[in-house]
Image (cartoon, rainbow, N blue to C red):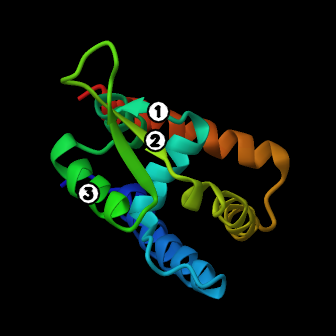
């Protein structure tokens, strides 16, 4: 039997623990209505607001069927709104609300805290190399 490597298993564990710690840190700021998966959607919209749903799905690596109920929930609690595109009424654009824009600084600080946790005792060179490897893995997975 071929020697198995633990990379995927380790990434899954890191993901799970990272989400748990991220949620705990958000609770310190009294933010409990957004889970880490929803935070991925908000992060993409903070980078570029007003994305069509199909582009948001690509930016977050979520399927439309997974994304839609998450958007429903975020819209329900007032963090985003979906608006018909002027050019194509069949296309919906997703925008952040003012309520959500006020949270952006908190999320940024929590993200910096997480970066410090993830990269504790790493040199800048090691961080860059590690992220290059992760990008290669992501590219390999997206090619399937």
Pick the quarter of the image with the C terminus: top left
The residue at the point 65 percent across, 87 percent down is: 28
Pick the quarter of the image with the N terminus: bottom left
The residue at the point 40 percent across, 62 percent down is: 37
Neighbour class for label 2 at 10 Å: few (<14), some, many (≥20)? many
Up/down of 62 relative to 106, above or below: above
- SS state under label 3: helix
Neighbour class for label 3 at 10 Å: few (<14), some, many (≥20)? some
Residue corresponding to mark 2: 95
Residue 73, image quadrant: bottom left
The residue at the point 43 percent across, 50 percent down is: 41
Q: In the rendered view, does 3 fall on the left or right side of 29? A: left
Residue corresponding to mark 1: 50
In the rendered structure, which disc, 3 or 1, sits on the residue that comes first in sequence? 1
Please say if the residues under marks 2 and 1 sit with CB atoms less than 8 Å apart: yes
Up/down of 81 relative to 17, above or below: above
Q: Position of residue 30 (x, y in %)?
A: 60, 85
Specify the label residue 72 is tagged with. Answer: 3
Camera-side residue of 19 and 136: 19
């Amino acid at each position: 039997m071929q020697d198995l490597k633990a990379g995927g298993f380790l990434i899954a564990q890191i993901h799970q623990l990272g989400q748990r710690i991220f949620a705990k840190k958000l609770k310190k700021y009294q933010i409990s209505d957004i889970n880490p998966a929803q935070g991925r959607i908000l992060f993409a919209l903070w980078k570029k607001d007003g994305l069509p749903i199909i582009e948001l799905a690509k930016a977050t690596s979520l399927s439309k069927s997974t994304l839609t109920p998450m958007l429903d929930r975020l819209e329900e609690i007032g963090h985003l709104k979906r608006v018909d595109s002027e050019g194509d009424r069949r296309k919906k654009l997703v925008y952040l609300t003012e309520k959500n824009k006020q949270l952006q600084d908190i999320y940024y600080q929590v993200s910096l805290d997480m970066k410090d946790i993830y990269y504790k005792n790493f040199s800048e060179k090691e961080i860059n190399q590690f992220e290059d490897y992760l990008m290669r893995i992501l590219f390999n997975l997206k090619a399937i």
